[in-house]
Image (cartoon, helix red, strand yellow):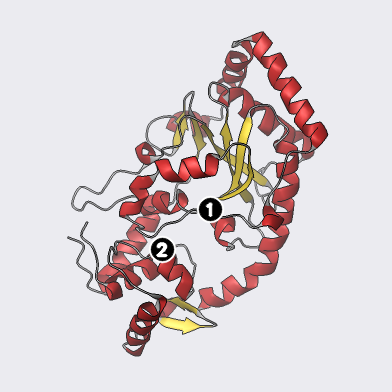
Amino acid sequence: MKSFTLPHSILSTISFFNALSYPLTVAEIEEFLMFFTGSTKAMDIITALDLLESRGMVKSADGMYTVPHRTEIIKDRLATYASCEKKYRIARQATRVLACIPFVRMICVVNSLAMNNAHEESDIDFFIVTKKKRIWLTRFLVVALLDVLGKRPRGNMRKNMICTCFFASEDALDFSALQIPPLPDRQLPDLYLAWWASRFVPLYDEGGYAEKMFSVNEWAKGIFPRRRLYRTIQEHRVGLPFFGGWIKRIGEFLVRIMGRASEHLARAIQIRILPKSLRALCNRDTRVVMNDQILKFHVRDMREEIRAKWYNTCKTYDINFF
């Protein structure tokens, strides 16, 4: 896709986040300008926004911008701030426990909470990086512990539960192969995955995996040229407790003595109890992926829908993509 002019890039960016029901501040627009490779400053963006708003193409309130017919999402975003801070407290508590599990290398908050846009009734999405060749065992231990603690989503019970639908081995952090395919009549990229790989919030990072993951997903820069690694604020970071560290290392030592038997057993158990809904979709596309490097369980994958909403909104602005 070609590089956009600044006004078209701003409209495209606002349209994408509108599909996520997320209004943007000027700073966020500057950071996530889509398909814009030129140089610009915040004042240039403000000037362009003023022009676009005078023409009725965007609306603003409380320092945030969205498309004209979605101004209600500004109030929604303001209302989510308190619930997001509560969810981060719960996420940190869960991370302190899960970080002690053998072979857990990084735990990140992703999706809506990563942008402080999680609603009161929503769950908390975790992305977990594991030691290579230990992904099945690690997921088994994580899910089992969350079950014991009563923190795993079940049915309609999702509020503040910990959703662990995405695990990756430390040697499989490039997600370009997980992109949804472009539409046959237009080469539109996987916008959401590019954003997802650019905006994750590491709560626990044992060995600099956040920087590694960000750098190997450089392909996302073709969509978000100004992307930069999110630096988690100190209050949200979680370290490994002293005794938890000892438990983790002893557990890893014992598993190594057992060789690969524990990994094979954990894999066999999880495949055997896999729900039919997941089994039917397993490895058919990128919604449900199961192998020794990626475990991804997203039956309801919204990426196609988000891309279609973005595309249709952009067309109303007469943005030429090619």
Give the percent coordinates (x, y) of residue 227. 41, 57
Q: Name the mark on residue 293.
A: none
Quadrant hosting residue 45: bottom left
Q: Which residue is mark 1?
A: 111
Quadrant occupied by the C terminus: bottom left
Going by the image, does 107 lie left or right of 133? right
Q: Position of residue 308 (x, y in %)?
A: 33, 58
In space, the residues marked 1 and 2 are separated at their CA atoms by 15 Å
Q: Is 206 rendered above or below residue 232?
A: above
Q: Residue furthest bottom?
A: 54
**Upstream in sequence: badge 1 or badge 2:** 2
Residue at image x 50%, y 44%? 211
Q: Indicate the amino acid at tag 2.
A: Phe
Tag of residue 32: 2
Residue drawn at point x = 55 percent, y = 61 percent: 115
For residue 159, say whether it is visible.
Answer: no
Task: Tell me the element at label 2.
Answer: loop
Tell me the SS state at disc 1: helix
Do the CB atoms of the residues marked 1 and 2 lie less than 8 Å apart?
Answer: no
The type of residue carrying mark 1 is Asn
Label 2 environment density (alpha carbons within 10 Å; few <14, some 14–19, many ≥20): many
Confirm whether residue 282 shows in the render: yes
* The quadrant where residue 266 appears: top right
Please tell me whether mark 1 or mark 2 is closer to you in this view.
Answer: 2
Q: Position of residue 54 (x, y in %)?
A: 34, 90
